[in-house]
Image (cartoon, rainbow, N blue to C red):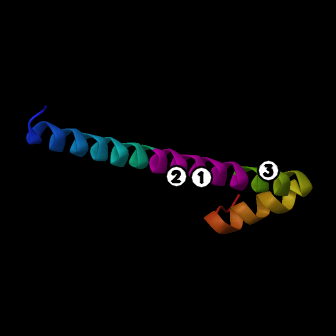
Amino acid sequence: MRPLIFGRLWKENIALNLVKSMVKKTYRGMIFIIFLSVLLIGTVLLITFLADPMAMFEHIKQVFGLKH
């Protein structure tokens, strides 16, 4: 028969491992969502540029205040 303290530490270790696992999964999920968001923005910008390159270039010059 094990002393009570080992049983308590064992249960706390399981709970800690569960929390660590959940945090890792949440972190990976957030990174994946950010990655998909960047891909979506890049795709939209690329399609917009391919649809009308000159209008896109003019818009960029207007937004950033380029005079050339």
Q: According to the image, label 1 marks what residue?
A: 33
Crowding at dot 1, Cα within 10 Å, few <14 / some 14-19 / many 20+, comes out as few
Crowding at dot 2, Cα within 10 Å, few <14 / some 14-19 / many 20+, comes out as few
Q: Is residue 59 left or right of residue 12?
A: right
| The quadrant where residue 51 appears | bottom right
Q: Residue at x 84, y 53 (%)?
A: 47
Q: Which residues are magenta?
A: 25-41
Element at badge 3?
helix
Whole-Å distance between the Cαs marked 2 and 1?
Answer: 5 Å
Q: According to the image, label 2 marks what residue?
A: 30
| The quadrant where residue 10 appears | top left
The x, y position of residue 49, in whole percent, is 83, 53
Q: According to the image, label 3 marks what residue?
A: 46
Q: Is residue 51 magenta?
A: no
Whole-Å distance between the Cαs marked 1 and 3?
Answer: 20 Å
Amino acid on which the number 1 mark rests in the picture: Ile
Element at badge 1?
helix
